[in-house]
Structure formats: C-alpha cells, structure tokens
Image (tube, helix red, strand yellow):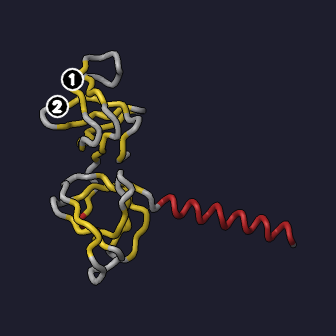
Amino acid sequence: MQKFLIILFFLFINSSYAISEENNYFLSLKKDKVYVRYGPGKNYPIKYIYKKKFLPIKVIDKKDNFRRIIDHKKNSGWIHRIMLRKLNSLVVLEEKIVFSKNTKFSKPLAKLEKGRLVIIKECKLNWCRIQTGDYIGWINTKNVWGI
C-alpha cells in the first residue's frame, strides 16, 4: 500500500508539472499602450504600463480573460488577453550580429545592441531570420528572450 501511495504521489507531481509547463508560452503586445495590473481583473490597480508594441512576453498563468505574464526584465503582472497577439518577436539580451545567412561565416549586415526588439520571420535550429529597421537577416538564438 505504501509503495502504491508513493507511486501515486510521483505521478501526481509529474502530471501537475506538465500541466504548468503547457501554460508557459510567448506572445507579443498588440498595442503601444498596455496596462499591467496587480490581479486578473479591471478592478485591480494598474501596476505599470508597457509602451512598446510587439514586446515579447511569457504567459505563465491564466484566469478568465486575463493572462499573468513575465517579461525579459522579470517584471510580472496581469494583462487582458485582447492586448496580446501571436506575432513572434524577441529581445536581444546581449550584442548580436545580423548575418546574411544562418551561419556565422556569412556576411555580417548589422550589429544589434542589447535590448533591441526584432520581429521573427522564421527559425531553423539555433538561428532565426529577423527584421529590424531596414535590415533582414539571421541571428543566433543564444541569449535572446521570446522563443
């Protein structure tokens, strides 16, 4: 009986872990002005305001029409789901070089500063084809936030 309870306990822990991992996914901000609240409802006070359209955020929980999020600076709060979209974007967490192809041996096109927001066009293995300003090229996905 004791072995059965131990096995049941471990199965419960593993299944609850898997369920919580399914809630962790990336979205982007839909508007230039998005309110982040202390709780999952419009009656909760505003914690801070995002002013960066397309900023990637990670959804870590949901309740009704609100999503609990965390950003690349570890700020967290609740956002109404209508202010979020599936557009893929990322934030560069360290200086990066944009290359013409998905290899570091191709022609360098531009240098991205830490904190730069870019739009993802496609990804292959450890590389993503991105657009930022007038540049379209490939960056390595090491030390980025949003994928």
Q: Amino acid at mark 1?
A: Leu
Q: How many marks do you count on the picture?
A: 2
With 24 as the anchor, is 47 left or right in this view?
left
Q: Which mark is residue 135?
A: 2
x, y percent for residue 38: 34, 74
Name the outermost residue toward the bottom: 43
Q: Position of residue 120 (x, y in %)?
A: 27, 41
The answer to which of marks 1 and 2 sits earlier in the sequence is 1
How far apart marks 1 and 2 lie (CA) works out to 7 Å
Could you say whether the residue bearing mark 2 is in a helix, strand or loop? strand
Query: In percent of the image, x 30 and y 52: which residue is there?
Result: 56
In the image, 59: left or right of 132? right
Q: Nearer the viewer, residue 60 or 92?
A: 92
- Image-quadrant location for residue 50: bottom left
User: Residue 91, position in %: x, y?
Assistant: 30, 44
The quadrant of the rendering that contains the C terminus is top left
Q: Residue at x 31, y 32 (%)?
A: 95
Specify the label residue 36 is tagged with.
none
Q: Residue at x 79, y 66 (%)?
A: 6
- Residue at 28%, 78% in the rendered image: 45
Q: Do tag 1 and tag 2 residues touch (Cβ < 8 Å)? A: yes
Please, is residue 121 above or below residue 100 in the view? Answer: below
Outermost residue toward the right?
A: 1
- Residue 40 falls in which quadrant of the image? bottom left
State which quarter of the image contains the N terminus: bottom right
Q: Secondary structure at mark 1?
A: strand
Compared with residue 134, is residue 42 higher up or lower down, i.e. above or below?
below
Q: Which mark is residue 109?
A: 1
In this orientation, which residue lies closer to the viewer: 24 or 78?
A: 78
